[in-house]
Amino acid sequence: RTAWNVPEMMSNTSPVRVLILDDQPEYYLASLEARFPDVEFFACSDNAVVRATAERVEPAVIFSWKNPAIANEVQRAVVNRPSVRWAHVAGAGIDHLMPFENTTLTLTNSSGVMAFAMAETVAGAMLMFNFDFHRYLQQKTTRRWCQTPWQALRDKTVLIVGLGHIGRAVAAHAKYFGLRVLGLRNQSVQELAQVDELIDQGQLHEALARAHYVCLHAPLTDNTRKLLGEKEFAQMRRDAYLINTARAELVDEAALVNALEQQQIAGAYLDVFGREPLPADSPLWEIPNVVISPHVSDSTRDWPEHFAHFFADNLQRWLASESLLNICDCERGY
């Protein structure tokens, strides 16, 4: 049932064909095949093979994983083929498939699937900075004993930019620790139990001036690109920390480096970068109060299975002509 990077001519009477764009489908492919014995799955991890397989197989469904093994332009070309009726993204971001041209196609994503893991990571980052865990790790390397007084998270303020599945999960964790939660909303959000105060984008600067932690969970769109730049960092508290586990392009990286070097803000936890891997000559490596992780903030050991299980549930719905979960607004880009 599976063609592994080998294009194959198919008959006109063959069953539904699903093209998987991923370099590590071995984590979940067998479970998909077992659950859907009448569906043909084709896993591809090479740009040339992806194109050739799509041309010969003419898949109806695409399961897209954003990774460097398959170029964004190749994924866009495949998704926009006339035979494709539905494309599902393993992850929340769909910007790698934009601009979206196939108007007859439904696009869904996996937004919310790993929200529980991302929220734990963000809560961990706030706890780390609050108790100075990062400084104590630095002290350990030099066998230095220096005690740092600290304040509890309770009664501090966090600004959450983006109130989707992840933002709301982060808000719930923040409320548990007693933080005051400010949330930058979109037009569809009117009230959230986890958020103490909803703000509009026009109030962003005022909210930045109040927040001890600024957590980014917004999608990348024309309106959010470089949402935080020189003016925004100038508004932030000098004891504030930036936490970005969403998209690097939400932040003007040069402005961030300057704000950190000039101690306009206290530090940052960064999991996403404009160039990945982060180049060795990036100044971010040298700034003491910057904690860097290699784009793994929701990468639990079983994360591929979580995404594949959600896709499988949606595939079950699609085969039964039922409504799909997480249909994206392609005009807005999320």
Image: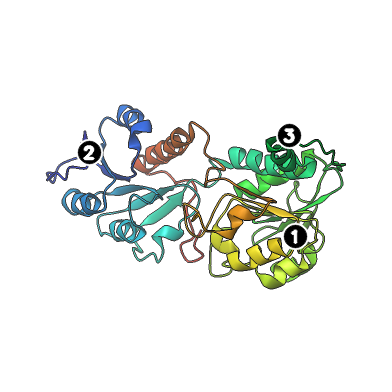
N-terminal of the pair, mark 1 or mark 3, is 3
Residue at image coords 68%, 45%: 170
Q: In which quarter of the image is the N terminus?
A: top left
Relative horizontal placement of residue 8, taking residue 235 as reference (left or right): left
Instruction: Determine the CA span between mark 1 and mark 2.
Output: 49 Å
The answer to whether mark 1 and mark 3 are in CB contact below 8 A is: no
Return the x and y of residue 187 as percentages of the image width and height: 65, 64
N-terminal of the pair, mark 2 or mark 3, is 2
Relative horizontal placement of residue 224, taking residue 148 as reference (left or right): left
N-terminal of the pair, mark 1 or mark 2, is 2
- Residue type, numbered disc 3: Arg
279 or 219: nearer the eye? 279
Decide: is 332 above or below 21.
below
- Residue type, numbered disc 1: Ile
Instruction: Determine the CA span between mark 2 and mark 3.
Output: 52 Å
Numbered label attached to residue 181: none
Numbered label attached to residue 4: 2
Return the x and y of residue 62 as percentages of the image width and height: 33, 48
Decide: is 294 above or below 329.
above
Return the x and y of residue 222 as percentages of the image width and height: 54, 70
Q: SS class of the residue under badge 3?
A: loop
Instruction: Assess disc 2: are there few (<14), some (14-19) or many (≥20) residues with their C-alpha within 10 Å of its C-alpha.
Output: some
139 or 170: nearer the eye? 139
Name the residue tied to disc 1: 265
How are the residues colored?
rainbow
Residue at image coords 69%, 43%: 125
Residue 252 seen in the current view? no
- Residue type, numbered disc 2: Trp
The answer to whether mark 2 and mark 3 are in CB contact below 8 A is: no
Residue at image coords 59%, 42%: 115
Name the residue tied to disc 3: 143
